[in-house]
Image (tube, rainbow, N blue to C red):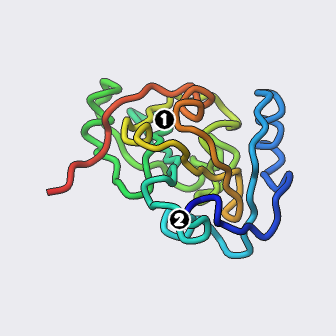
């Protein structure tokens, strides 16, 4: 099924208010789709939208030497923490706790969008995202997503394109 075949429950300003404001400030007009069932995981989102798992953008918060950093990764892949550490020149990188994710971004895990966060953080975007015409990311809640071309998504997020995807054997 193509992304155009996906039928959302509603289409409108269903984004989280903070994210809706970020869209307004950026002058970005995107279709936010709300689904009755959660799209909190990449698998749930891909199934609801009807797209490939790799078209889902995971917005993941890590701590590099205690400083939050956002990593944008496709839904079919995992982040290689050693590559993130090396890219940042950090001594230690670890997944952020749920309270730090909310404090840093203003959103709960499962709904973190790629931009429109409470605080400005460094953003790394895995190069694998650029292999798609359209990708889908959370719009601030576990029930909402929006489509965008990956180059624009990375630009709006202020991201640095890099290779941080874990290699599978």
Q: Select label 2 or label 1 by which is in front.
A: 2
Q: Label for residue 69?
A: 1
Q: Is residue 77 above or below residue 44?
A: above
Which quarter of the rendering shows the C terminus? bottom left
Q: Secondary structure at mark 1?
A: strand
Q: Residues within 10 Å of mark 2 (few under 14, many from 20)?
A: many
Q: CA distance from mark 2 to mark 1?
A: 25 Å
Q: Is residue 69 left or right of residue 94?
A: right
Q: Is residue 20 left or right of residue 121?
A: right
**Percent coordinates x, y for residue 51 in the rendering:** 52, 61
Residue named by callout 2 = 46
Q: Earlier in the sequence, mark 2 or mark 1?
A: 2
Q: Label for residue 107?
A: none
Which quarter of the rendering shows the N terminus? bottom right
Q: Secondary structure at mark 2?
A: helix
Q: Residues within 10 Å of mark 1 (few under 14, many from 20)?
A: many
Task: Name the residue at 48% across, 68% down.
Answer: 43
**Percent coordinates x, y for residue 10 in the rendering:** 82, 65
The mark total stands at 2
- Is residue 148 or residue 90 the one in the foreground? 148
């Amino acid at each position: 099924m193509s992304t155009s075949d996906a039928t959302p429950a509603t289409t409108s300003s269903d984004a989280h208010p903070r994210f809706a404001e970020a869209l307004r400030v950026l002058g970005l007009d995107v279709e936010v789709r709300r689904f009755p069932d959660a799209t909190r995981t990449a698998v749930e989102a891909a199934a609801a939208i009807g797209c490939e798992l790799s078209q889902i953008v995971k917005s993941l918060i890590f701590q590099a030497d205690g400083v939050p950093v956002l990593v944008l990764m496709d839904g079919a892949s995992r982040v290689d923490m050693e590559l993130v550490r090396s890219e940042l020149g950090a001594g230690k990188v670890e997944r952020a706790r749920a309270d730090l994710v909310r404090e840093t971004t203003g959103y709960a895990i499962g709904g973190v969008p790629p931009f429109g966060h409470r605080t400005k953080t460094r953003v790394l975007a895995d190069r694998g995202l650029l292999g798609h015409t359209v990708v889908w990311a959370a719009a601030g809640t576990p029930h909402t997503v929006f489509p965008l071309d990956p180059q624009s998504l990375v630009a709006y997020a202020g991201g640095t394109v890099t290779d941080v995807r874990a290699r599978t054997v």
